[in-house]
Image (cartoon, rainbow, N blue to C red):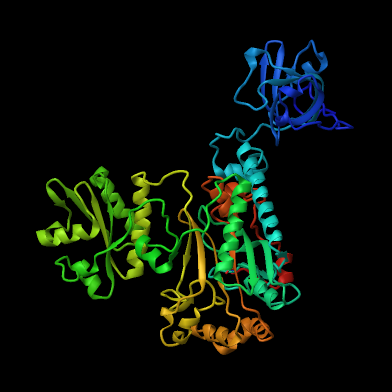
Amino acid sequence: MSTSDHPDITLDSLGDWRADRGCGTLRSEDIGRELTVIGWVDTRRDHGGIVFIDVRDRTGILQVVFDPDDDAESHRRAHGLRSEYVIAVRGKLAKRPPETLNTELPTGEVEVRVAEMKVLSTARVLPFPLDDEGDAGEAVRLKHRYLDLRRARLQRNLVARHRATKAVRDYLDDQGFVDIETPILTRSTPEGARDYLVPSRVNPGSVYALPQSPQIFKQILMVSGYERYYQIVRCFRDEDLRADRQPEFTQIDIEMSFVGTEEILGLTEGLLRAGAAAIGAPVPEVPFPRMTYEEATRRFGTDRPDTRFGLELVELSDLMENAQARVLAQAVQEGGIVGGVVAEDGHKFSRRELDETVAWAQSIGAKGLAWIRSTDDGWQSPLAKFFDEGEREKIEARTGLRKGGVLFLVAGPRKYAQGILGQLRLRLAEMLDLIPENQWNYLWVTDFPLLEYSQEAKRLVSVHHPFTAPREQDLERLESEPETVLADAYDVVLNGTELGGGSIRIHRPDVQSRVFAALGIEEGEMREQFGFLLDALSFGAPPHGGIALGLDRLCMLWLGESSIRDVIAFPKTQKAHDPMSDAPSPPAPKQLRDLGLKFTQ
Ligand code: ASP
């Protein structure tokens, strides 16, 4: 039966044919062997009477040669082969003639002289070429993800990810950890994002939440005496997506009993070394440097500083308090700050680039961004007229502004100003090409505040999650000055990206109740939502703590990719859509009826 539009192609069955070796594994020492290889037609070249095909499997590419002198029948059929047909060939491995040697290919010295061929499968014309440099849009690639995943780069990524995952499992196993699964259909775990909800048919009117993390379950496992738990687990968060976020993502989730921060940091450093080595990324030196949250936000404007370059923030509040520039002075008088960043090579910026930078700052929420250019003719700035010589000298001394440089200033509440300057710092580093390649700055950020005021929620919220332990010495201020209480929490950061975080947990029910109360969770709601945890803590809970690391993000950084979609087999788009299976999709009316649901929009 002909299954293709090409008259010469009929499909064969595999029968007892099996590949002896992967295509990409053959070398000159194998010359002379009779063998079978099976794979996809990568490229085809018709050279006069001879047909050359590159056959590809996951180990690589191998040239096979159809010569009528070797086998006339195979040669005749070879004319009908097209890209991505699946074929099996038998023949002898030969040395390539000098003119066809390819030093760029590991198999570039050898070729199979085909004595027999089977065509196992045909393929329609491809929607996009599979070569690695192909720039087909992501939408079409994700729609045909099965083809996209054939590309060498993605194959390399997924195999490398497997190796890293295995190394992590082996490492944790060696350290006495037990892999325990926790439910996917569960109750909400507060990690600060929206939940994905699953309506329950057998409990009309009720929903499960998909876990934002297994946080409560892993703590309960500690109460149950498992001491060292880990899981490589899918987590679900319904939030706005970016290049390094997916609605479902994978965490290396860890919890330990009878330990303090030091043991958890040490274990995590060892784990990152094992993973990096397995994936082929540079193995980091340990221990990693540490920085408190206060220092990170003060110097870098963020709790995940990229320390590969300078451009540190400076504070000028005391110099601006009585400045003639009203906006600056007013910010300080109202309890805020004036902060700045100096770009030493700022003379490279055109006026247009400066204006664009101001517009960009406004687009990320800045009310204003001032700049001062120091030139041979003195200061150039819309603000220049407000500062006399003495003031200028003080500002230059404080900030390090020299001729050729540009000082950017932001004024307002501390957190806001640091946030804008922190992002500006990254943008300037990119504009000025200051970010060194092949540098891997791992860093611990410690001493986070336990709680922060949320303008949106109009109440205190957890900086990590509500189960994070306040530092013992700060506990007495939990009710009186809650925002000054620091937590036994830590995040690990690589080149400005948060790899993960964790904390020592609250293991006393009375402290847990006080933290819930500080978060404005009332007694009834507390029992309703977390009664089971409070109960568990009241039955002999060991002191415990843990951490979770984002596996997708880790692999992305280790492999030098810029999107986590390139290290996930079946990712979703920025709109949480899977173009291949077209999920999510409207439910059938019967499904809605069964669940007792009605969509209102
Ligand atoms: N559950 C936390 C998270 O998902 C990690 C931890 O505290 O262990 O971020």
Q: Quadrant of the N terminus?
A: top right
Q: Quadrant of the C terminus?
A: bottom right
Q: Can residue 470 be spotted in the picture?
A: yes
Between residues 361 and 98, which one lies in front from this camera angle?
A: 98
Q: Can residue 601 be spotted in the picture?
A: no
Q: How many marks?
A: 0
Q: Left of 568 or right of it: where is 2? A: right
Between residues 86 and 431, which one lies in front from this camera angle?
A: 431
Q: Residue furthest right?
A: 16
Between residues 295 and 303, which one lies in front from this camera angle?
A: 295
Q: Left of 291 or right of it: where is 186? A: right
Q: Left of 423 or right of it: where is 518? A: right
Q: Position of residue 571 (x, y in %)?
A: 61, 51
The residue at 63%/60% (across/down) is: 252
Measured along the vertical axis of the image, is residue 87 above or below residue 191?
A: above
Measured along the vertical axis of the image, is residue 426 above or below residue 206?
A: above
Measured along the vertical axis of the image, is residue 9 above or below residue 564?
A: above
Q: Position of residue 380 (x, y in %)?
A: 16, 51
The residue at 22%/53% (across/down) is: 401
Q: Position of residue 456 (x, y in %)?
A: 43, 74
State the image quarter where residue 66 is shown: top right
The residue at 58%/46% (across/down) is: 566
Instruction: Indicate which quadrant contains ligand 1.
Output: bottom right
Q: Position of residue 257 (x, y in %)?
A: 65, 73
